[in-house]
Amino acid sequence: MSTPQPDRDHQISQRDLRNRSAEIMDGLERGESYAVTRNGHHIGDLVPIRRRRRAVSRAEFAAVSRGMPRLDDRKYREDADRHADDGLYDPYDRAYGRGEFAEDAVDDGEQG
């Protein structure tokens, strides 16, 4: 998504930006954009940030969800089981393999 281009009506100099900063910030909050110039040359743009909404209404969620494909939970689980090896990710197996638990740790400490 592209940012809105400032129009020539909202062209401001570096001096204007410094002297009228509060007014310009109020304009940004209203959604206005500004082209900033220095010595008559365009050096940048001030554009309002896009605000993210924190919540989506139930109706909006339902409307968007209608276009989503249906998920077959049994097929999903079968696929996950076929491609994921849970044994590789068991933190206890890895820790026991390194000797970090119980008797291994005590024995190593007594011998040192």
Image (tube, rainbow, N blue to C red):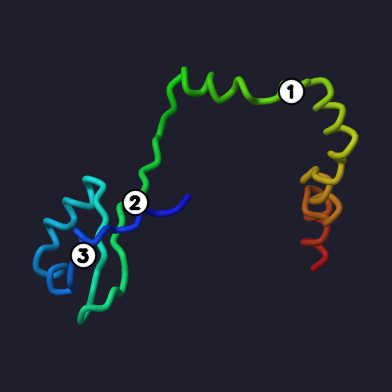
Q: In the drawing, what numbered circle is on residue 49?
A: 2
Closer to the eye: label 2 or 3: 3
Q: Position of residue 10 (x, y in %)?
A: 20, 59
Label pair 1/3, CB-CB below 8 angstroms: no
* Residue furthest bottom as drawn: 39
- In the rendered image of this protein, does residue 62 appear above or below residue 2? above
Tag 1: amino acid? Leu
* Residue furthest left as drawn: 19
Which structural element holds mark 1?
loop
Q: Residues within 10 Å of mark 1 (few under 14, many from 20)?
A: few
Q: Position of residue 112 (x, y in %)?
A: 79, 68
Task: Say whether residue 49 is left or right of residue 29.
Answer: right
Mark 2 vs mark 3, CA separation in Å? 18 Å
Residue at label 1?
A: 71
Which structural element holds mark 2?
loop
Closer to the eye: label 1 or 3: 3
Tag 2: amino acid? Ile
Q: Residue at x 81, y 61 (%)?
A: 108
Tag 3: amino acid? Gln
- In the rendered image of this protein, does residue 59 appear above or below residue 53? above
- In the rendered image of this protein, does residue 31 appear above or below residue 64? below
Q: In the drawing, what numbered circle is on residue 11?
A: 3
Q: Residue at x 83, y 57 (%)?
A: 98
